[in-house]
Amino acid sequence: LKIKLRSRGGVQMLQSNSFRWLVLIIGLMIGIAVAAVTGSVPPFADRPHGVPPPPGQKATLTIPEAIADQAKPTFSGPLGEFLVTPRVAADFPPCPGPLKRTENYKFHELYSPVFGGRLEVYECANGIIPYVAQDYGGPGKRYFVGPAKVPYEGPLDRLVLLTIGGHSAIAQLPIPGFPRSLRIVAIERFPTSHLPGILVGVDNVDMSLKDAAATVARMMGVQP
Amino acid sequence: MTRFRLLVAALSVLLIMSFSQPGNKAYAQSRSFGTDTIRFIGAKQGVNYDSSPTLGERWCWVTNQSNGTGWHGYWVSNAEIVPNPPEPIYGNALDEVAQLYAYNSSSAFSTYCPSVNPPGSDTPLAPLAQFRVFGKTDNPQCTAVNPCTSLVALGRSGTYAVTAPCSYIEVDLYDAGTYGTSSLPDGTRGNGGDWKGMSRMIHAMGRASWNATIFVAQNGWILTTVDDAGSVVKEQTTCPWTQPSGYHVHHDFHAFNYRDVVFVEQEYSPCAHQHGFALAQSDANG
């Protein structure tokens, strides 16, 4: 009814507008069809293809920043209060075997509520519990004697000394290109003639250094 | 009408952008289409008794012992650890050795899963720890002759610092379409992405870092292998397992984002010989 009331020019304008919209819609449909055929837009997107290597491939590294990192010499030696000993962890106090599973750990000095429950905790034949942890990779606490060895393996520029709530700590920053490889350890207690020392930390996490340090602080019950 | 015009305009802009930059960064970052299934094969290579090109060689797992010092013997869903008093079942973990001879009902170590050679010695019979997976997808664009990339595998190895000083090989799995797209503001992490989980082998050690790409196809299982991911080791004392009780690889899988990882084959039975374990990895569609 409104159209009838418009002028002749107004009707022509409406027809012209409709024609433009028709062209746009047709163009749009053609575009969608082309996108679907070429696979250039999700959800029509084609996935990247490739040729898998033949069975029996060797472990290789093709991430440039990781290759550059591996080309640097691995640090070994004293660093702050720590002794960096690649792939060799700190010594435990005497722990004669066989190790025996124990459920009696929640009031142990190595336990932290951060670990949660249902832990796999072992007790030596002499009654010592050498470590308590949520997982092999931590978060966890362990006893040590002798120097505070850390089994970190990397160049010096990825090893960072820091202090967490007054405690000496060391972090191994992630391998470039390997996000979940930040490691951090703090010395909660140095060993004495009658007490083993305590190391606390976590291995291979996807955290910022600040958050990892905060986690270690919580395990020690201190402010970061 | 105004809203309709806006919609058409937005769609047009998107279309123009899609054609102006084919294969650009945004495209690379998009989640890929399809649901992929990744089947892990045991880290210890045994014998392929079925001549199957896809199931891989058989391996043995060792059941829990009643005295609490036994090995993990179950591979169940990634869900919670299931209490089974007095021994909890450690779901998501098993200890494996290669199966080299036909199964029989007697003790595995002394017969078909010998672990060391000769018996009672300190020499591992199958020293290599391997990372091997088969991949499949429901995306028809991915074929056996032209497979698609599914996951980026980032392997690393070392010794744990604050718990049992056990050796490990950890393999993080990222969606290949999103790997390298996120970082933390303080620069302590880069190249992250859509993490799908971590396959881990303990009591084995390899090179500090390596990477591989896992491929998938719709019309067949695509094998991806890293044959020298590491070797079995004796371990320091105070790692819960040390020689001479039998070289093995503890294998588990960590996936905290349970939504994307479910098992398609569950192995509850403490059978002495199995083919492998598998998981389905949802790769797309949010």
Image (spheres, helix red, strand yellow):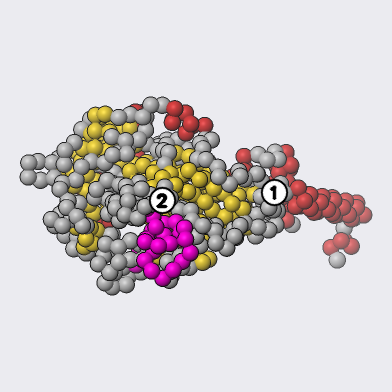
Give the residue number, with chain letter if any, for mark 2: B125
Q: Mark 1 lies on which chain?
A: B
Residue B127: % across, % down: 42, 47
Question: Which residue is pictured at 16% across the width and 38% down the height?
Answer: A146
Residue A111: % across, % down: 21, 55
Residue B32: % across, % down: 62, 51
Between the C-alphas of marks 2 and 1, the distance is: 37 Å
Task: Give the main secondary structure of the magenta stretch.
Answer: loop
Q: What element carries label 1?
A: loop
Give the residue number, with chain letter if any, for mark 1: B146
Which numbered tag is attached to residue A62?
A: none
In the rendered structure, which amino acid carries the disc numbered 1?
Answer: Asn
- Residue at far bottom of view: B85
Q: Do labels 2 and 1 share a chain?
A: yes
Task: Give the magenta part as a residue range.
Answer: B89-116
Magenta-span inclusion, residue B74: no
B87 in relation to A200, above or below: below
Question: Which residue is pictured at 20% across the width and 51% down the height?
Answer: A130
Magenta-span inclusion, residue B98: yes
In the rendered structure, which amino acid carries the disc numbered 2?
Answer: Leu
Front-most of residues A3 and B219:
B219
- Residue at far left of view: A194
Front-most of residues B155 and A207:
B155
Residue A9: % across, % down: 90, 51
Q: How many labels does the image show?
A: 2
Question: Which residue is pictured at 55% across the width and 62% down the height?
Answer: B49
Question: Which residue is pictured at 48% across the width and 43% down the height?
Answer: B228
- Quadrant for the N terminus of chain A, please: bottom right
